[in-house]
Amino acid sequence: MSSSEKNNNEEKLNPEEVAKKVKDVAKIIRETSSTARETVRKFHESGAISEFAGAVQAAADATKDTATEIRDTAKEVRDSHVAADTAHAVEEAATAAGQTVQAVQDTARQIPKAAPKTIKSVSKVKKTVAKTRKAADANARQAKNKVKKTVTKTRIEAKKITRKARTQMNKNKRGSTRSVKKTAR
């Protein structure tokens, strides 16, 4: 707003209008203070203010009691060294966890180093087992063949011995029969 506009506004308001506006404001103030007085009277008559004051006092007492209990509990915790013991246990657990992590990392590093050796060892054992199996199979075949040959030879020899024994027995029978006949004559 410029200074010329202010002058125009002042010129437009005349003293009668200003007086009327002041009267209106005074009327509003009277009505508001009357309403406020009436409200305070109603609060007082209903006992709401006393109840509110009592509730505030009860809340203050409860807050005081709670603060006292918290203070006493804090002193007990401080005097019992529970917090220090708990902190020490947490430190030990953290140290143990760190050692466990380190052991796992060391183990994880060892696996790639040991794996090639393990694979070579397993391969060698596998080859040795295969060679041993082949040798055992060959030995078993050879033993089986030898046993067959020996059994066959033994049968043949047994048949020969049986024939010779029969032949010999027959000769002995014939000879003894002849000698019995000679002596009988």
Image (tube, rainbow, N blue to C red):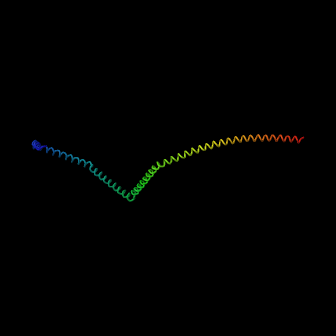
Of residue 26 and residue 42, the one placed in the foreground of this image is 26
Lateral position of residue 95 relative to residue 41, left or right: right
| Picture coordinates of residue 99, whole percent (x, y) | 43, 53
Marks counted in the figure total 0
**Which quarter of the figure has residue 25?**
top left
Of residue 65 and residue 160, the one placed in the foreground of this image is 160
| Picture coordinates of residue 59, whole percent (x, y) | 31, 52
Of residue 150 and residue 82, the one placed in the foreground of this image is 150
Lateral position of residue 164 relative to residue 23, left or right: right
**Which quarter of the figure has residue 143?**
top right
Of residue 93 and residue 175, the one placed in the foreground of this image is 175
| Picture coordinates of residue 109, whole percent (x, y) | 45, 50
| Picture coordinates of residue 37, whole percent (x, y) | 21, 48
Quick check: 143 above or below 90? above
Classify the position of the C terminus by image quarter. top right
Lateral position of residue 157 relative to residue 183, left or right: left
Q: Residue furthest bottom?
A: 79
**Which quarter of the figure has residue 144?**
top right
